[in-house]
Structures are given as C-alpha cells and as structure tokens.
Image: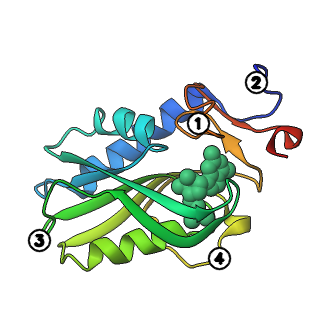
Amino acid sequence: MITKFDEVIVGEEDIRRRVLEIAAKITDDYRDREPLLVCVLKGAVFFTADLVRQVSIPCELDFMAVSSYGSAADSSGVVRILKDLDAYITDRHVIIVEDIVDSGLTLSYLRKNLTARNPASVEVATLLTKPARQKVDIKCKYVGFEVPDRFVVGYGLDFNEHYRNLRFIAALPEEELG
Ligand code: 5GP
C-alpha cells in the first residue's frame, strides 16, 4: 500500500470550490422543482454528501449501487444493479450524481434505465470526466473537472477499495495498476 502520491490531479481546495459552484447552479436551475439527487455508490458518496449540503433549495436524496462488468480499469457497459432506488421517480426531476465518466457506458445504461421510469427530467452531475476515453456521447449538465487519461483515486474513487478516503484526486502510479 503506497502512502505518497506524486501526481495530485485535483487538490482539496479546488474540489471544495467547484462543489460550491455546482451546488449554486443546481440551486438556481431547480428552484420550485425539488430535485431528487441519485448518488451512485460508492464512488460518488463524498461528492454527493458535500454537494447536497450546499444546495439551498428543498431536495431529496436516494442511492443506487451498480457494478460494471470488466476489469478495474475498463468497464464493459454491461451493468448489474446491486441496489436499486427506494423512491419512485415518475414525474420527478432526477439528477444522477456520478464520480467519473470514463467510457460513458455505465452512465449511458443508468440514464436509459432511469428514463424508462418516466421521470420529469434526468440530468447528470459528475465530479470528473475523462474526455480522451469517452466512447458514447453523454450529455452531463454539471461537470466538476476534466482529467487526463490516467486511473485516478481519492475523494470516493478507489482502487480495489483503497484510497477512497484521500481528500484530493491523484493519479495511481502505473506500477500499482499492474
Ligand atoms: P465507464 O462505464 O464510464 O467506462 O466507467 C465508469 C465507472 O468506472 C466509474 O463510475 C468508476 O467506478 C470506474 N472508473 C472509471 N475510470 C476510473 C478511474 O480513473 N478511477 C477509478 N477509481 N474508477 C474509475
């Protein structure tokens, strides 16, 4: 287990500032619409927790857990729902809160799945995108940061369940990725 990260991709203060900006936008965009924020476990847990506490209109929170078949570094787009929403979302304004859009396949599946339940709207707030790797065209209304084509960890994102508790986002050293 390494403890030192040489390549910090997004620092703690930058995350804090961007989360405030996104929360302000959501507050503006969803006035009188009481959005339902759907946190995609586990990676988006800290982003969601920090974001929702800065949204200053009434909103609700729910959770989904999905697993994408494939290796740690490559998702296949075949997604299994491990935990579904508790809430019915018909006629609700849904915001999917994700950690990272890599190929976009997981989010594409999730969006289709939730749209089939007839919500009033579905938008996406993602902390990170990796534009160099995107395979499907996904519209994300709220994006925290674009990151380079590296495997990143921290602030909720893991490698084999490690490093979620870092307060910043760092590139995993290539030798550890294997
Ligand atoms: P996609 O389907 O967009 O290729 O992959 C999405 C999921 O793969 C993310 O929700 C995340 O769980 C995982 N993932 C993709 N890239 C990274 C990365 O750089 N670091 C970590 N920790 N997970 C990633």
* Residue 166, picture quadrant: top right
Q: Amino acid at mark 3?
A: Asp
* Residue 132, picture quadrant: bottom right
Mark 3, residue position? 91
Q: Amino acid at mark 1?
A: Glu
Q: CA distance from mark 3 to mark 2?
A: 46 Å
Q: Amino acid at mark 4?
A: Lys
Q: Evaluate if marks 2 and 1 touch, with contact meaning CB atoms under 8 Å apart.
A: no
Q: Residue at x 30, y 53 (%)?
A: 38
**Res. 120 visible in picture:** yes
Mark 4, residue position? 135
Residue 141, how many percent across, how many down?
Answer: 42, 63
Mark 2, residue position? 1
Q: Residue at x 29, y 71 (%)?
A: 114
Q: Which mark is residue 80?
A: none
Residue 173, how many percent across, how many down?
Answer: 84, 38
SS assignment at label 2: loop
Mark 1, residue position? 161
Is 66 placed above or below 165 here? below
Residue 156, how many percent across, how many down?
Answer: 52, 36
Q: Residue at x 47, y 68 (%)?
A: 79
Q: CA distance from mark 4 to mark 2?
A: 32 Å
Q: CA distance from mark 1 to mark 4?
A: 25 Å
Q: Evaluate if marks 3 and 4 touch, with contact meaning CB atoms under 8 Å apart.
A: no
Q: Evaluate if marks 4 and 2 touch, with contact meaning CB atoms under 8 Å apart.
A: no
SS assignment at label 4: loop
> Of 53 and 178, which appears nearest the observer?
178
Of pointers 1 and 3, the one earlier in the residue sequence: 3
Of pointers 3 and 2, the one earlier in the residue sequence: 2
